Image (cartoon, helix red, strand yellow):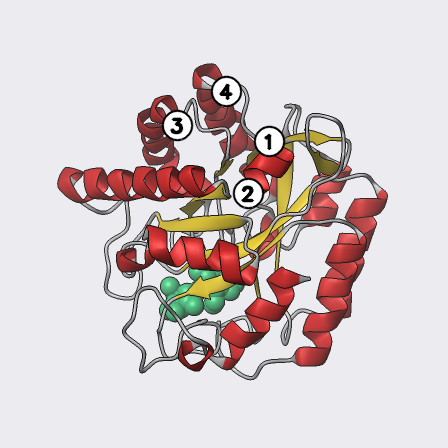
Amino acid sequence: MTPFEKYGKLHVAGKNLTDASGNTVVLKGISTHNLNEYPQYVNKEAFKQFRDEYGVSIMRLAMYSAFADNHEGYSDSNDEHRAELEELILKGASICRELGIYCMIDWHILFDYDPNMHTDMAIGFFKNICPKLKDFDNVFYEICNEPNMNLKTGEKTTWDEIKNYASKVIPVIKEIDDSKVIIVGTTIWSQGVDEAADAPLDFDNIMYTLHFYADTHRDALRDKFIYARGKNLPIFVTEFGVGDAEGDGVINVEESKKWLDLLNGEKVSHIIWNLSNKAETSSIIKAGCSKINGFTDEDLSPCGLMMKDIVSK
Ligand code: IDC
C-alpha cells in the first residue's frame, strides 16, 4: 500500500495534519536541492527507490525564486526558463502522484530575503500551476521558504510583513483550489513559530514552517517549538539538516536525535535537506557519485545514511 492509499487527502485539524477519519499523519521525506541547479534528480526511478527502500512518504520540490549559486531563479529569469521550471514542478508532482507519495511545492525564497519582494511573481507562479494541480490530492503548497531580512530596514522580516504577503498569496491559491494545505514560512529563516503562535493567520488549512540545522539550532529553538505547540500551532518541518546552518560542517548525531525525538513525539512531519551530490555535508549523495537513481549505500554520504534511518522510523 502506498502512503497515499493509506492516508488519502490530508488536511489540518487543530495542530495536526490528519486523514479523513481524523487520524494524525506524520510524513517523512527528502527535499531536492535548488531545482534550477539539480533538475536531474526529479525522476521516477529515484523517487520510487526512496519510497520503497527508505520509506519516504513526501518529496519537496525546492524551486529557488531568486538567483543563487550562479543559477537564475524563477523571478530573475526569462519566460522560457520559468516555463521549464513549471514543467519540472508538474513532472515532479505527477511522479509523486503515480507513486502514491505526497509532494511539497516550495516557493524557495532565500536571497530574495523578504517574500514581499516578489509577491507578483509568486502570485503569477501559483496562478499558473494551481489550476493544473487541482486534481492532485497529494500536493501541498509552501509559499515562502525562509523569510529572513527586510532590505529597506536591514532588520529581519517581521511576522506582520510575512502575514501581509500571505494574505495576498493564500486567497489567490484558495480561489483556484481551496482544498490544499498551505504552508507559511516564519521569521528568521523560518524559526519564528513562537510569533506565529501568538498571532496566527485567519485562514483554514494552514500550517507554519519551522526549520532547524541540528548543529547550529539547539535548545533555544526547541523551546520556541515547544511553546508554539503548547499554543496548538500546526507546524510542518519542511526542511532540516543534521549538520550546520550552512548546510555543511559536521553531523551532530546527538542534537539531531533530540530534534527527531521531539518531532516524532509531537507527530510533526519533517523533510531532510538535500537531494544532490554537492560537496557539502547536507547532500545525501556522495560528491563523486553522478548517478541520478539506483543508489546503493555506497553512493550515499554519511548524511544520506542517516536520512535512511530518520525516514524509516
Ligand atoms: C544551501 C545549500 C547550499 C547553497 C546555499 C545557497 O545547501 O549548497 O550554496 O543554500 O543557495 C537553508 C535554505 C537552503 C540552504 C540550507 C543550508 O533553505 O536553501 O541550502 N539552509 O544552508 N536554510 C537554512 C539552511
Tell me the number on the disc at residue 133: 3
Between tags 2 and 3, which lies in front?
A: 2
Q: Amino acid at mark 4?
A: Lys
Decide: few, some or many residues near mark 3? Use Cα within 10 Å; few <14, some 14-19, many ≥20.
some
Between tags 2 and 4, which lies in front?
A: 2
In the rendered image, the quadrant that contains the C terminus is bottom right
- At horizontal 66% and vertical 51% (from top left) the residue drawn is 192
Q: In x, y percent, where is residue 233?
A: 75, 40
- At horizontal 29% and vertical 61% (from top left) the residue drawn is 38
- At horizontal 39% and vertical 70% (from top left) the residue drawn is 295
Q: Secondary structure at mark 4?
A: helix
How far apart are labels 2 and 1 at the CA level? 10 Å
Camera-side residue: 110 or 49?
A: 49
Decide: few, some or many residues near mark 2? Use Cα within 10 Å; few <14, some 14-19, many ≥20.
some
- Report which quarter residue 95 is drawn in: top left
Q: Is residue 215 above or below residue 135?
A: below
Q: Amino acid at mark 1?
A: Gly
How far apart are labels 4 and 1 at the CA level? 20 Å
- Number of marks present in the image shown: 4
Tell me the number on the disc at residue 2: 2
Q: Left or right: 104 with respect to 6?
A: left
Q: Is residue 243 above or below residue 156?
A: below
Q: Amino acid at mark 3?
A: Leu
Q: Secondary structure at mark 1?
A: loop
> Which is more N-terminal, label 1 or label 3?
1
> Which is more N-terminal, label 1 or label 2?
2
